[in-house]
Amino acid sequence: MKINVPMINTIFKYLAISFFVALVPLIVTPYKSAQAAVRVKDIAYIQGVRDNQIYGYGLVIGLQGTGDSQIFKITRQMAVNIFQKMGVLISDSDFFSKNVAAVMITANIPAFARPGDKLDVIISSIGDSKSLEGGVLLQTALQGADNEVYAVAQGPLSIGGYNVEGQAQSTRKNISTTAYISNGAIVEKEIQASILYGKSLSVVLRDPDFTTANRLVEVINNLYPDSSKAIDSAVVNIIPPSDFQSENTIVRFVANIEELYIKPDSIARVIINERTGTIVAGENVRIATVAVAHGNLSITISEKPEVSQPNALSSGETKKVQRTDIQISEEEKRLLVLQEGVTISDVARALNVLGVTPRDLISIFQAIKRAGALHAELVIM
C-alpha cells in the first residue's frame, strides 16, 4: 500500500487528537483539586502576628451648635486644659461653647506597623452632643492596654450622614454622633511582634478543627519532612529547617507555608435565622430516610348581618339577623420520602417539589431534626 503525504497528515492529526483526549483528564483533575482547596493563609495565621487595639479621648471642635451642653462638665474641663497648655489663662466657669464635643477615639494598629504609617480611626461622642457633622478632631494621643502611646490622631471628621432638627420636625441619616477619619492617625511607636519562639513557630487555624489540622500537618510534612505536628485542633507547631532559622530567611519560609493548598473540613451545620427566613446549610449535611408531608389548613369565619323584613300587612317586626359563613380549605400535599444519605442539594430539590417557602423550610428542618433524621448541628439565630 502506498502512503502519500495527505494520508500521513491525517494519521498525525488522528494521533494528536487521541493524545490530547487522553491528556485532558490529567490536566483537569489537578485543576479541580486545586479549586476545591484553599490557601493556608486564608484559613490560618502565624501566632504572634496580629492587630492591637489603641484608644484615646479628646475634643472635636468646629461644630455648628451641636456640641455638648453646659451640663457636661468634662468637655469644659478638657477645653480649659488645652487653653492653659497654650498659655491662655481661663477658668472653668468662664468657658461656654456648644461648638465643642468630648469624644473617644479607637483604632487598630497592625503588626509590624512602623513609625510614620497611617491608620484609620473611629470617633464616638461620649457626651450629649447631637451631631459631629463638620467637626475637626484636635490632636489626641492613642494608647494601648499597657498605657503606652503608640499613635496620635487629628483631622476633619466624616460622618456619612446628617441630623437636621427644626422646632416641629427632625430628619436623620445614619448615626451623626459617630464619625470616621481615613488615615487620621500616625504611628509614633512600633509594637514588637515575633514570629519565631525559640526555634519554632505556630500556625493557628481561624476555625479550629482536628481534621483540618491533621491535613495541614500532612501538607507541610510533604514539603518539609518531619517539621510539623498538631498541638490541638487549632495550633500546628512547625520547626523550620536549619536553612530557614535566620531572620533573613524566615519570611520566605512563612510565605512558602502560606501558599500551600489544603481542603478544610468543618462540622455539618444548618444555620436558620427565623427573623429573616434565611437558611444556610453546609455541603456535609446528610439526612436519614424520612417521610415529609407539608400542607396548610386555613379556616375563614365571616359574619354577615342581614335584615329580616316581615310580610306586608303582618304584625311582625323588622329585625337584624346574624349570618355566619364558615369556610375550611386545606392544601393537598403528597407524602415525600427523602432517602438516607442524600445531600442538602437533594433535600432542597425535593422540598421544592412540595412548593414550600423558606418559612416552611425552617419548620420542616426543625421537625426533621426532632425526628433524629438530620445528621447535622441545627443552629437557630
Image (cartoon, rainbow, N blue to C red):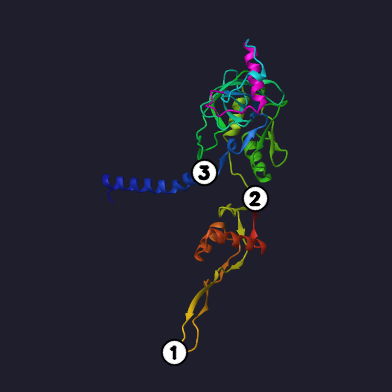
Name the residue that disc number 2 marks: 267
Residue at coordinates 62% horizontally, 66% vertically from top-left?
289
Write down the region rendered in magenta: 61-86
Mark 2 residue element: loop
Q: CA distance from mark 2 to mark 3?
A: 21 Å
Name the residue that disc number 1 marks: 313
Name the residue that disc number 3 marks: 35
> Where is residue 98, by image quadrant?
top right
Looking at marks 3 and 1 on the same chain, the residue that comes earlier in the sequence is marked by: 3
Q: Amino acid at mark 2?
A: Ile
Foreground tag (3 vs 1): 1
User: Is residue 272 shown above or below 233?
Assistant: below
Which percent across, then down, holds residue 255? 58, 30
Task: Tally the numbered discs.
Answer: 3
Looking at marks 2 and 3 on the same chain, the residue that comes earlier in the sequence is marked by: 3
Q: Amino acid at mark 3?
A: Gln
> Mark 3: few, some, or many residues within 10 Å (few <14, many ≥20)?
few
Residue 83 belongs to magenta span: yes
Mark 1 residue element: loop
Which percent across, then down, holds residue 203? 66, 34
User: Is residue 76 shown above or below 288?
Assistant: above
Mark 3 residue element: helix
> Mark 1: few, some, or many residues within 10 Å (few <14, many ≥20)?
few
Which percent across, then down, holds residue 90? 64, 14
294 or 22: which is nearer to us? 294
Foreground tag (1 vs 2): 1
User: Is residue 277 shown above or below 92?
Assistant: below
Q: Amino acid at mark 1?
A: Leu
Residue at coordinates 65% horizontally, 13% vertically from top-left?
84
Which percent across, then down, holds residue 51? 63, 29
Q: CA distance from mark 3 to mark 1?
A: 93 Å
> Mark 2: few, some, or many residues within 10 Å (few <14, many ≥20)?
few
